[in-house]
Amino acid sequence: MKDISRKFSTLRTATARATLRLSPETIAKIRDGAIPKGDPLPVAKVAAVRAAKETSRIIPYCHPLPIEFVGVEYEIGEHRIHVDVVVKAIAKTGVEMEALTAASAAALTLYDMMKMLDAGMEIEKVTLIEKRGGKSDFRDRPKGGPRRAAVLVISDSVSSGTKSDRSGRLIVERLKSEGIKVEKYEIVPDEPDMIVELLLGYSDAEHLDLVLTTGGTGFSPRDTTPEAMSKVIEREVPGIPEATRAYGQDRTPYSMLSRGRAGIRGTTLIINLPGSSGGVADSLDALFPGLLHGFGMLAGGGHDEKKEKR
């Protein structure tokens, strides 16, 4: 089974279609309510709902999911019945297998209830029509070239050379993998004035799109990054640290102890991340790819209505 523990939950939707070919005479019997075993359509609908909820017990590598909705619709033609199944769940992985399994179960139920009437009946195909809600749906393509970023490591021990930097390097590699160009990578001690000077330079002089800091967000008397942010940011973005702390809290009880902040100065987004490499990794998983949408908003763009449609 694939490890999805690092993923975040989103609304996942999938639509699948099963097509059953049968004779016009059998179609007529369905319309007339003359199927000996009873009306097959509501029975097949119940089978589809049950199959969607039981998919992880049928398909070995499927994760158990909290199914929120299963919808079943029929399109009855002269020679065919199309069964369309929509499945929704707020989960870390997609529901396409649930939709496909449900559509298959509905078609098999229809077949079972009418096989004695139609020897030529055939399940022609089961197809995935659409799936939405995965990471690719939230990955905005940058306009006007790659985004430009700085990574600022704030640590007395790292700046003095008594400790090596892991968190900053992790951020650099992750930004590169997201298509963001890292133009600055610097290390400073926990000195508020130095932090403020660099953050002002990144935003006012360099006009970078993104600045990620790591370190100085805890309870230590030397942890002053949030206080330095107060002298720099013009607009607070509370949802970002809320999201990173909530994501982290599901994985460690210490995430709530971070005082990191996020805000905007000019057109530069500045975000404080924890100092530990584990906290940084969790925060980056929470931020991307959704964070990429913010750059378009900073440039004056709106939301994509198609992506927001449910």
Image: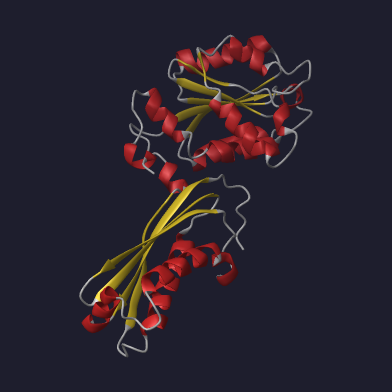
Residue 23 in the image: x percent, y percent?
Answer: 24, 83
Residue 57 in the image: x percent, y percent?
Answer: 59, 69
Residue 56 in the image: x percent, y percent?
Answer: 58, 65
Question: As displayed, is residue 154 above or below residue 42?
Answer: above
Image quadrant occupied by the N terminus: bottom right
33 or 176: nearer the viewer: 33
In the image, is 306 to the left or to the right of 268?
Answer: left
Question: As displayed, is residue 1 above or below residue 231?
Answer: below
In the image, is 170 to the left or to the right of 103?
Answer: right
For image coordinates 21% across by 81% down, the residue present is 24
Q: How is the image coloured?
A: secondary structure
For image coordinates 29% across by 72% down, the residue present is 81
286 or 201: nearer the viewer: 286
Locate residue 131: give its quadrant: bottom left
Locate residue 213: give its quadrant: top right
Question: What is the count of numbered marks?
Answer: 0
Locate residue 301: give its quadrant: top left
147 or 299: nearer the viewer: 299
In the image, is 23 to the left or to the right of 170?
Answer: left
For image coordinates 46% across by 22% down, the residue present is 208
Question: As displayed, is residue 55 above or below residue 111?
Answer: above
Image quadrant occupied by the C terminus: top left
For image coordinates 40% across by 34% down, the residue present is 146
Whether residue 140 is visible to the viewer of this picture, yes or no, is yes
131 or 47: nearer the viewer: 47
Residue 93 in the image: x percent, y percent?
Answer: 53, 54
